[in-house]
Amino acid sequence: MIWERFYHYLDLKSKHPDASVPPLDYTLRKITEPETDLILQNQSVIDSYRRSFELQGNPLKKPRRLLRDKTSDEVGKENITAPPGNLIEYKSIKVEKIGDLTPVQDFE
């Protein structure tokens, strides 16, 4: 039923680009929206459950800095031409045969 709604909306958008999302069908609305009577009856239980979980920030997590947050001076100071220290140094070794015991290492 959800896929039907999705593809119906895609079809509608392909024919009319300015079309808005059609309203929910009664059946889908009954499934997705909570019953207000049930919520009102159990509001005290819901509130006590919500109070038992306190949201806290993570003190160990550092704020992320994105490239777009850096100033132009910080971006210019980075040395892009310097090679990283963890590059593998390639040695020219002539391998005659790739064996059965360690074929990956022989190939590399």
Image: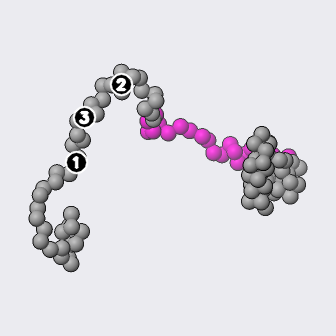
Q: Which residues are magenta?
A: 40-63
| Cα–Cα gap, marks 3 and 1 | 14 Å
Residue receiving disc 2:
74
In the rendered image, residue 96 lying in the magenta stretch gets the answer no
Identify the residue at the far front of this view.
15
| Residue 48 seen in the current view | yes
Considering only vertical position in the picture, is 1 above or below 50? below
Q: Earlier in the sequence, mark 1 or mark 2?
A: 2
Any mark on residue 87, and which?
A: 1
Considering only vertical position in the picture, is 95 above or below 21? below
Quarter of the N terminus within the rendering: bottom right
Tag 1, which secondary structure? loop
Whole-percent x and y of residue 92? 11, 58
| Residue 45 seen in the current view | no
Whole-percent x and y of residue 38? 85, 52
Query: For the point 56% across and 38% down, which residue is it?
Result: 56
Residue receiving disc 3:
81
Considering only vertical position in the picture, is 99 above or below 19? below
Q: Is residue 67 left or right of residue 51?
A: left
Q: Earlier in the sequence, mark 3 or mark 2?
A: 2
Whole-percent x and y of residue 47? 74, 44
| Cα–Cα gap, marks 3 and 2 | 16 Å
Please, what is the three-letter code of the amino acid marked with disc 1? Leu
Q: Nearer the viewer, mark 3 or mark 1?
A: 3
